[in-house]
Image: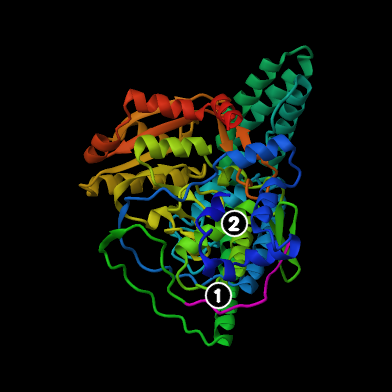
Amino acid sequence: MEALDVHENNENFKEHSPLSETRSSDLDPSTSQTAKRKFAEIETNNSPQDTKLFKTEKFWDFSLESDVVVMEGAPCIFLPPIPEVEFFRFNLVKQMRDEYQDICKQNEGIDAPQESFNRWLLERKITDKGTDPILPTACCNDVSPAMFREIIHDVPIRISKIKSCSDARRQLFRYGEAAKHMIESRNLSLESRKVVKWHIEDTLSWLRKEQNAVLTDYLNRLAHIRRQCGPHLVEAARFSVENICKKMYFIAQENAKKLLDKHHAVLRLYKIDVPAPLQPSGKLCPVKPVPMLCATPMLTNSITQVAIKGTVSLTYNANTLRINHRYLEKLEQLYRCSCKDDPTMQLFLPRVWCLLRRYQTFFGPNQYEGIMLHGALPTQVFQCLHDTFGVTMECFASPLNCFYKHYSSAFADTDTYFGSSGPILQFFPVRGSFEANAPFVEELMEAMVDHFEKLLKQSNEPLSFIVFVPEWRDPTPVALLRMENSAFKRKQVLIPAFEHEYRSGLHHAAPQKEVYHKAVHGTLIFFLQNDPGFELWGPTQQRLRKLITAFKPVARHHNRQQD
């Protein structure tokens, strides 16, 4: 297995590997090679064909060395991950999700928009200077643009996907009734009341008369009434929706303080002092994981592990998290490459548990929640990016979905032990070729473009960012428009919808048949490069043909079968 190759001849690793206990308890300890093969072949819920494909596809390649040079930043200011604190954070964030739902229901009579809480966390962390790695506590404004936009979009009702004439008719009627109730119960100007009331009455009258309308008629009517009434309803709901945003921000600040107090209390028990923050040195150096400022308590026997077929269950305080065995070995390999403070691997399992708990806390406890915010490109695309454009680092990844051993990720505190250089907006490369596939949050994508353009403007060394974004056009996001008109844009390529795939954000725990999902939107690829970067890694026609071919699902399946 790929994740074992680097450790084959390392006796110190074999002696201290936390996975060795799993192998010895579940398999014959006298046949280590058989044990490795057995774990590779047994995968929960996988057919023999899935297992064969899983074995042959290369989900990561840590043998690829990087030539990235960066301006060294400051050590991570967050306190080290501790299972007790991470479990407390999980419970607090879970309560916040419930509170968000309740507040939206009470104030606006709607369910909290799907994935809105997750995107709120992502958007808030762009400018947050607070003390918690997840919860926002020190932002430039109390009202989140992302949260406000998503709630207001569902006012007065959420329009779900329309599948039939009867469904369209029902939703059009519901929208009219909800808008009518809203103008009667909110403070609107007399002129706004007249406009909304007239359009509602006209629509309801049309519904009563038109019994044989087709789907297009209903869709046009719905679009028309939303266009005419929407601005007035937004103004009517503005104060209430802003209060929802402020309330969630206030709750986050309170919970972050509770977490910080608990974290300090645990560190005091282990007599660990928290050093004062350090300033960045500003010197140039090869890329490396972001250093932690504070030492980690030597936690022992806090995590239990059980291996069943191809899945490993890690449990802390009756809270169990699961990971496919191969991905646990991936984390083991990353840890061995990147972690410098734990040569005996005693902290490996507690840190893995905190890592898994953090990402599930961040993206939500429900099945498939956050799956698109943590997705990744197909692995053959990553290989092509390296071979063709010299890419050796990802700008938006995690230890769970990274292909290269160097990457930036959302959480410096949990991810640094597994190779992360920290958040991309706090990462300042001067040389290198990078892949960037940001979570689809408009504010984050805008901040990404700002950051990349500043880096490209400042560096005289070869610098290249290959950016993947969804082809959204109604309306077109600001980030997309910015890249289309950027002085650093060398090429723009469209991969059509349904003609390519993405890897699931849950591939580290899901059956392999669920790893790939067809893209329901087109993907735009932007090549942002300075002059030296363009000279070295420019998007020539030959290189682009290779990249487009690598994106084709048929080509991937064909290659798998050849393997």
Which mark sits nearer the N-terminus, 1 or 2?
1
Residue 276, quarter of the rendered image: bottom left
Residue under label 1, please give it.
Answer: 260
The kind of secondary structure the magenta stretch mainly shows is loop
Residue at 66%, 38% in the rendered image:
52
Q: What element carries label 1?
A: helix
Residue located farthest toward the top when viewing the structure as drawn: 212
Q: Is residue 301 magenta?
A: yes
Q: Which amino acid does label 1 sit on?
A: Leu
Q: Does the magenta stretch include residue 424?
A: no
Percent position of residue 175, x then y: 70, 32
Residue 321, quarter of the rendered image: bottom right
Percent position of residue 420, x then y: 46, 58
Percent position of residue 133, x then y: 52, 64
Percent position of residue 466, x then y: 38, 38
Q: What residue type is labelled 2?
A: Glu
Magenta highlight range: 295-306
Confirm whether residue 31 shows in the render.
yes
Residue under label 2, please give it.
Answer: 329
* Colouring mode (rainbow / by chain / secondary structure / one colour): rainbow
